[in-house]
Image: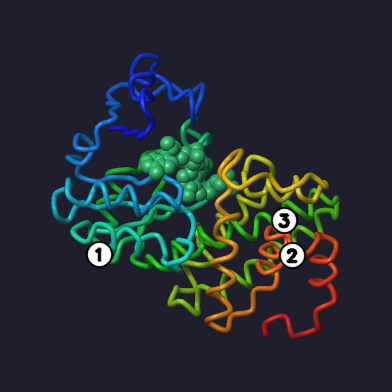
Amino acid sequence: MLWTVIPGHAEDMARTGENKMFLPGVPIAPGVEVTGDLTVLAQASAILMVVPTGALREVAGKLAGLIRPGTPLVACAKGIEPKTDRFVTEVIAAAAPAATPAILSGPSFAADVAAGLPTAVTIASADESVAAWLAGAIGSASFRLYHSTDVRGVEIGGAAKNVLAIAVGIAHGRKFGASAAAALITRGFAELRRFGLAHGARPETLAGLSGLGDLVLTCSGPQSRNFSLGFKLGSGEPLPAPGSGPLAEGFFTAPVLVEMAAKAGVEMPIAGAVEAVLAGRIGIDEAITGLLTRPQKAEAA
Ligand SMILES: NC(=O)c1ccc[n+]([C@@H]2O[C@H](COP(=O)([O-])OP(=O)(O)OC[C@H]3O[C@@H](n4cnc5c(N)ncnc54)[C@H](O)[C@@H]3O)[C@@H](O)[C@H]2O)c1
Ligand SMILES: O=P(O)(O)OC[C@H](O)CO
């Protein structure tokens, strides 16, 4: 079942058999019911919450009074809630206390998944039997799910990689070459790992599909909206108005990620540079010079 909040969208999808607004050219699979009625969706045995991080609390709150107790609400958003510093499953738990929060994350462009191209991602819930059940229910030959109980690790990887991909996009936009991009991905991963470990994530999760795997994918090129935002900035284009153009979650995550890192005493210079550029406090050249002139240190420090 596919639910949409946009007036007339469900009727349009039912009529055309296609989600022209968000996934044009991909037929909606036969047997998938489309609805604009949340009470209908709420009867499902599990619900994938595929909305931006900023809308997660609102949608989970609307579902709270409609779902059966224990229904898994699976965050598919990759971010951290601004202002509250809450990770996505914490937002679901707060807004829908009767639900079972879970998270689905990993290297997967929606267009690739929809086209049936081979994809592997991670699904996590505190209760391993719930995660394993969801993996069996959602997985297919082309959409391979690994299950985990490291909810925090999975949600941190997805949130941080978007910010770091903006940095890599900037480097490509500035024509810095593949060597610089590899350095940024590697040192960016060191930041993601430090942040994750400081917040209770398991190292193997951070190095897995939802962490390193998704960082690599999102830094791979313009199919990523976060990479593309960085690329445009690196090419000299102005910052688009917030909320205009395709959703780049890293834009919204950067300030809260950097603030939480500072509170936890975690060094994240690349994420910090991205945040400062997006906030307009420094220019791209100044950010790059700042990163390159940091004091030398041991690689594993
Ligand atoms: N597109 C991808 O390849 C992909 C892959 C993995 C994860 N994600 C993550 O999924 C999340 C959503 O991204 P997307 O690509 O689907 O974005 P999108 O902009 O393509 O679609 C967002 C969807 O959320 C709905 N929505 C927005 N605000 C809403 C609200 N207040 N109430 C109800 N519905 C609302 C929109 O109608 C739309 O259907 C993001 O956190 C993103 O990082 C995206
Ligand atoms: O287009 P992006 O940058 O939001 O990335 C989409 C997915 O998160 C990649 O796994």
Of marks 2 and 3, the one in the foreground: 2
Dot 2 or dot 1: first in sequence order is 1
Q: Secondary structure at mark 3?
A: helix
The answer to whether residue 287 of the structure is visible from this angle is yes
Position of 157 with respect to 44 (left or right) is right
The Cα–Cα distance between marks 2 and 3, rounded to whole angstroms, is 19 Å
Residue 54 lies, with reference to residue 14, above or below; the image says below
Of marks 2 and 1, the one in the foreground: 2
* Towards the viewer: 282 or 48: 282
Position of 134 with respect to 192 (left or right) is left
The Cα–Cα distance between marks 2 and 1, rounded to whole angstroms, is 43 Å
* Towards the viewer: 126 or 230: 230
Dot 2 or dot 3: first in sequence order is 3
The quarter in which the C terminus is drawn is: bottom right
User: Where in the figure is residue 142, as x and y percent of width and height?
Assistant: 44, 38
Q: Which residue is mark 1?
A: 127
Q: Secondary structure at mark 2?
A: loop
Residue 160 lies, with reference to residue 295, above or below; the image says above
Q: Which residue is mark 3?
A: 168
Q: Which residue is mark 2?
A: 281
The Cα–Cα distance between marks 1 and 3, rounded to whole angstroms, is 36 Å
Q: Residue shown at 43%/77% (left/top)? A: 200
Residue 71 lies, with reference to residue 24, above or below; the image says below
Q: Residue shown at 76%/53% (left/top)? A: 170
Position of 109 with respect to 185 (left or right) is left
The 10 Å Cα crowd at callout 2, few under 14, some 14 to 19, many 20 or more, is few
- The residue type indicated by label 3 comes to Val
The answer to whether residue 142 of the structure is visible from this angle is no
Q: Residue shown at 21%/52% (left/top)? A: 64
